[in-house]
Image: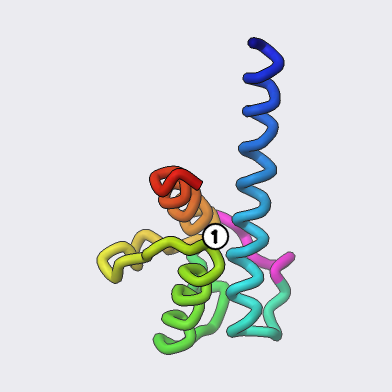
Amino acid sequence: MGEVRGASAMALPRQREAVRAGVLEAIREVAPELDPARLVDDRPLRRQVELDSMDWLRVIVGWHQRFGVDIPETDYARLHSVEAVVDYLLGRLEAAGG
């Protein structure tokens, strides 16, 4: 049983990193000049990436398409940092069984 838990525990960091990579890729599709290595995960995302409202919406739609989860407008304020977006998407994916 210990090995199963260990394998499970190892899968979570890999899944988190995969979601983080997808989050950054979706941002890069809208802002190709962005250097993702310069983003600080717990800092406000919109202060680090200069996007107008339409571009921000395109990023959110990109996350929806990439991860196949609905992101209601009422949740947009929760998507304030890379870390918050990753946590949010992981929660939505888990709730959807993915």
Q: Position of residue 28 (x, y in %)?
A: 65, 78
Q: Is residue 35 magenta?
A: no
Q: Is residue 42 magenta?
A: yes
Relative to 16, 84 lies left or right: left
Q: Is residue 77 above or below residue 53?
A: above
x 54%, y 83%: residue = 50
Q: Is residue 5 above or below residue 16?
A: above
Q: Which residues are magenta?
A: 36-43
Q: Position of residue 1 (x, y in %)?
A: 64, 10
Residue extending furthest toward the top: 1
Q: Considering depth in this image, is 25 or 69 the residue closer to the camera?
A: 69
SS assignment at label 1? helix
Left or right placement of residue 75 versus residue 90 in this view: left
Q: Residue at x 47, y 55 (%)?
A: 89
Q: Farthest residue in the left direction?
A: 74
Q: Based on the displayed image, in which of its 4 quarters is residue 52 positioned?
A: bottom left
Q: Report the amino acid beneath label 1.
A: Val
Residue 18, image x and y in percent? 66, 53
Give the total of numbered labels: 1
> What percent of the width, then of the height, locates residue 26?
59, 73
Q: Residue at x 46, y 80 (%)?
A: 56
Q: Is residue 54 above or below residue 85?
A: below
Query: Looking at the rendering, which quadrant does residue 31 occupy?
Result: bottom right
In the image, residue 77 sits, relative to residue 51, either above or below, namely: above
Q: Main secondary structure of the magenta part?
A: loop
Residue found 59% across the figure and 75% down from its top: 27
Q: Which residue is mark 1?
A: 82
